[in-house]
Amino acid sequence: MNRKTLFMIIGLMVMALAVVGVGYALWFEDLKIHGDVTTGELDLDFSGPYIYDYFETCDRDPDTALPDCPLKFDTVNCEALFEEGVMGTQVGGNVETDLTDPDWLGITVTGAYPSYTCQVTFDIHNAGTVPVHLFAWYHEDPTMPFPPMPLECASNINGPYTEVEDGVNIAQLHNDGAVWCRVKIHFTNADNLLENATYRFQYHFRACQWNEADMCTDFEYPYPAQ
């Protein structure tokens, strides 16, 4: 058998092995990377609120109040509830039903007149895991705006409280961190409010991921802010 015939036979055998699915042994090993990424939660809630109402003309100490001061509170009332639409200004929204995760604080004052003050104090706390920067804006009702009132905030309920400007960072809140804030509903005769009229106001808070806060504060909401 010559060399050419031998090579031909070997080639035919290799082709035959390939056709029947028999191959040469190949050693190998696989390495793999598998990952699961769970993102954090950005969640801020209200808690409180605490109401303190008084008349400027009366002693604020209930133990030494003027004789007729208690009678003045019979005709005025201030309420603060974790509920959307308390003032009837939220159109098309959903009523807050889960009071363990409140995102709406509604304040209603009835029977108010000059010299009466209702101060509502509340806290905003970070119930999530993502650190945030907190901002606030004041919104006026275009038809019956209430005289602008200051929003004051502090690191704890006892203060000291400082007035917050629109769009300025109030605080950086980490997990379980909180800031205390308060609003004072008050007007005088100089504000020229009408009798038997309903005036409205709204503060809008926004919590932004701390390292991208500048990218989420450039916005405007019509009144009421949804």
Image (tube, rainbow, N blue to C red):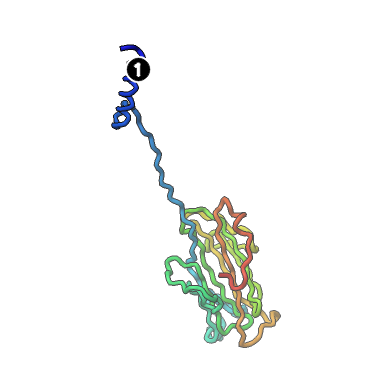
User: Image quarter for residue 108?
Assistant: bottom right
User: Please, which residue is most extreme toward the right here?
Assistant: 190
In screen coordinates, is 43 left or right of 56? left
> In this picture, is 211 found above or below 27?
below
> In this picture, is 109 found above or below 19?
below
> In this picture, is 213 found above or below 103?
above
**Is residue 174 at all visible to an observer of this figure?**
yes
Task: Tell me the quadrant of the picture where the N terminus can be found.
Answer: top left
Is 62 or 7 nearer to us in this picture?
7
- Image location (x, y in percent) of residue 153: 58, 63
Is 74 or 79 nearer to us in this picture?
79
Judging by the rendered image, the residue that carries numbered circle 1 is: 7
User: Please, which residue is most extreme toward the top here?
Assistant: 2
Badge 1: residue crowd in 10 Å (few <14, some 14–19, many ≥20): few
**Is residue 67 at all visible to an observer of this figure?**
no
Please tell me which residue is depicted at 49% across the width and 67% down the height of the picture. Answer: 103
Secondary structure beneath label 1: helix
- Image location (x, y in percent) of residue 40: 46, 53
Please tell me which residue is depicted at 49% across the width and 61% down the height of the picture. Answer: 44
In screen coordinates, is 9 left or right of 50? left
> In this picture, is 14 found above or below 183?
above
Task: Tell me the quadrant of the picture where the C terminus can be found.
Answer: bottom right
Q: Amino acid at mark 1?
A: Phe
In screen coordinates, is 138 left or right of 158? right
- Image location (x, y in percent) of residue 132: 54, 55
Please tell me which residue is depicted at 48% across the width and 64% down the height of the picture. Answer: 45
